[in-house]
Image (spheres, coloured by chain):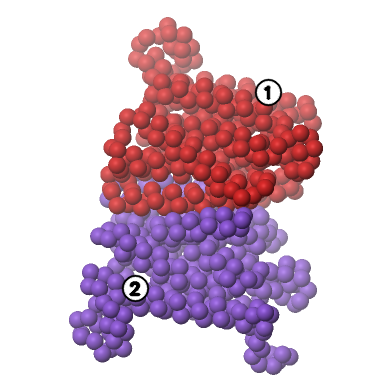
Amino acid sequence: MKSTRLIWLVVGLVALVAIFIGSLGIGAKSLPLQVVIDSLLGRDTGPDGTIILQSRLPRALIGLFGGAALGISGALMQTLTRNPLADPGIVGVNAGAGLAVTLGFAFAGISQPHVLFAYSFAGALTTALLVHLISIKGVAKPDPVRFILAGLAVGAMMSGVSSGIALLQPAVFNRMRFWMAGSLDVGDLTLVLAAIPIICVGCIIAFVLARPLNALEMGDDMAASLGTNPLKTQTATLLTVALLSGTVTAVAGPIGFVGLMIPYIARWVVGPDLRWMLPFSFLYAPILLLCSDIAGRLIVAGELRVSIVTAFIGAPVLILLARGNSTARTALQ
Amino acid sequence: MLSNRKILIGNMDGRFNLRLQLRHIIISIVLAIMALILAIFVLGLGTLPLSFADTLSALSGRADPRIAMIVLDWRLPRIILALILGAALGMSGAIFQSLIRNPLGSPDIIGFNTGAYTGVLVTIVLFHGDNVTITLGALGGGLATAIMVYVLSWRQGIQGFRLIMIGIAVSAMLTAFNMWLMITGSLETVMSAALWGAGSLNGMTWTKAVPSAIACMVGMFFCLGLARRVRMMEMGDDMAGALGLPVGSTRLWLMVVGVMLVAAATAATGPIVFIALAAPQIAQRLCRTRSMTLVASACTGALLLLGADAVAQHVFSPFSLPVGIVTVSIGGLYMLWLLIRDAS
């Protein structure tokens, strides 16, 4: 079992490196490997080098780190809530970021990418904190179902308010419809470079949390006797999820389904142990995201946004799994 | 004390009998009366405010013809439709939550609303359809999606969890497709689609209201005929089967009627979310029962939709918001209140 898991991880790593390089070369103008390497090393200062450094590198980097962040936060959410249907979006990051951005568009006239990033990041984190506080208010120990319901309710309200504002103001609506369809084509390397350290810190915390979360899955009493404090673990996990997925939303906009589907498959392939689920999700979520991004560039001339392609690639897999053999079904339940 | 008392209509051993809990009846009647009073109050609201007495006299045909026209032709269709659709959505929600045995189960679990929205976006963005084709697009999209989810979930029978999973996957794909249509269309067409997609009773007339209202009434009538089966299904498939209920076909019929109710409502107004989710939960708590109560859910749904529509139409004047946005916000607040109350 352990060697199969290792093989999955090695295959994932090799595939990820190949796809990362591929995503630098493939596009409206396909570039050979040599040009890609030259421009990364700064030896190609021609137009090809500019395309790679200014357009494709930020895109590939956010695909890599953003995908990892979504996969990791999805794995944390599913383990914490003991619910295979929990998406990182359930902490309210997408709805919160959406409301903040709508308010920014409608009342502050924001337009600069880094201001947008700040609004969306602040909205995501504030909402996640609000959901967490509501879910733990007045209860002795954290309850996953309460948390999911609180997330759903807060998310529904916030998206109701933002669509109300957007529907009354066509200009805001016009900008929101593009923001809502998350895209890796951010075109701003500084923003991506600002996001990468945050994501790295989040991932490290996630790996530290793997052991207490594993203990928590055995039940609160068991966890307590193993020296894990359920409330502290839940708080730390939720903040990490909010940090990771909130950062991705702030840079690229909402991207659904990756954080739901990859941890799901991870549980099926490597088992429920988070110490294996996390690395699997860390490698395979960016693979799905980068592949979807590449496919989006190739399918139609004008490019399809990645948040649209992921569902089209991922959903059939999910349907096959849900209909599939008994092993897959047990893993799904 | 109240909840234990039961009323029996007909002979206990007879072919037809009706066993009712007094509490359900009282709660349902109280809710219905509240909805009626709210309806008359809302009829008086608008650019020409009318008193309660004026509205009543207009309804009984004793008022000035101009006032009668405002009340009967302009305001009444909207109010009547809000009541009937609210009831239909509440009842359909109760059926689905009972079928899936999950408080988060709603008719949209089988993707009806998402599919209906796809149908509308396609007719508006790609074919520039008029009102009739938009309605047909909504119905076609919604029904096709519901059938697709059902067929994909079929594997020697329908199992709840598989249905949910496949519903989520199909909805995710359709949502992605909708998003793509939203960013490719022109702002004007997409915005009219989005206004439809938010669910709205704005500009309701008798000609638009009557077909949906009739379809909803017929659907609710069928539902009441199936009410006993709903209660038996809640005991579990094995138990219901042992009591002589054809489980598979009952489940199919309940889904068909549930989807029919949502379809009729959606055709008139666009998808109005959250009523189907919240009304059965509220009714359940009011009746202090663990099983789903169809009539009380319907009354709660009617009251909720009418109230939300009054807020959508009058609170933010001169703007009138789509009612779907208000139901989401109010429903969300209500759910939070329930959570916080349950904790303390």
Q: Nearer the viewer, residue A187 or A210?
A: A210
Q: CA distance from mark 2 to mark 1?
A: 66 Å
The residue that appears at 38% across and 62% down in the rendered structure is B323
Q: Quadrant of the N terminus of chain A?
A: top right
Chain A: colour as depicted: red
- Please identify, in this view, whether the residue under mark 2 or under mark 1 is nearer the observer: 2
| Subunit of label 2 | B
Is there any visible trace of residue A162 in the rendered image?
Answer: yes
Q: Which mark is residue B42?
A: 2
Residue B60 lies in what quarter of the image?
bottom left
Q: At numbered mark 2, what does the secondary structure look like: helix, strand or loop?
A: helix
| Kind of residue at disc 1 | Val
Is there any visible trace of residue A287 in the rendered image?
Answer: no
Q: At numbered mark 1, what does the secondary structure look like: helix, strand or loop?
A: helix
Q: Position of residue A97 (x, y in %)?
A: 44, 40
Vertical comparison of A245 with B315: above or below:
above
The residue that appears at 76% across and 38% down in the rendered structure is A224
Q: Nearer the viewer, residue B282 or A167?
A: B282
The residue that appears at 61% across and 79% down in the rendered structure is B23
Q: Nearer the viewer, residue A77 or A52?
A: A77
Q: Position of residue A149 (x, y in %)?
A: 57, 52
The residue that appears at 43% across and 8% down in the rendered structure is A42
Vertical comparison of A274 with B127: above or below:
above
Q: Which residue is mark 1?
A: A10
- Chain coloured purple in the rendered structure: B
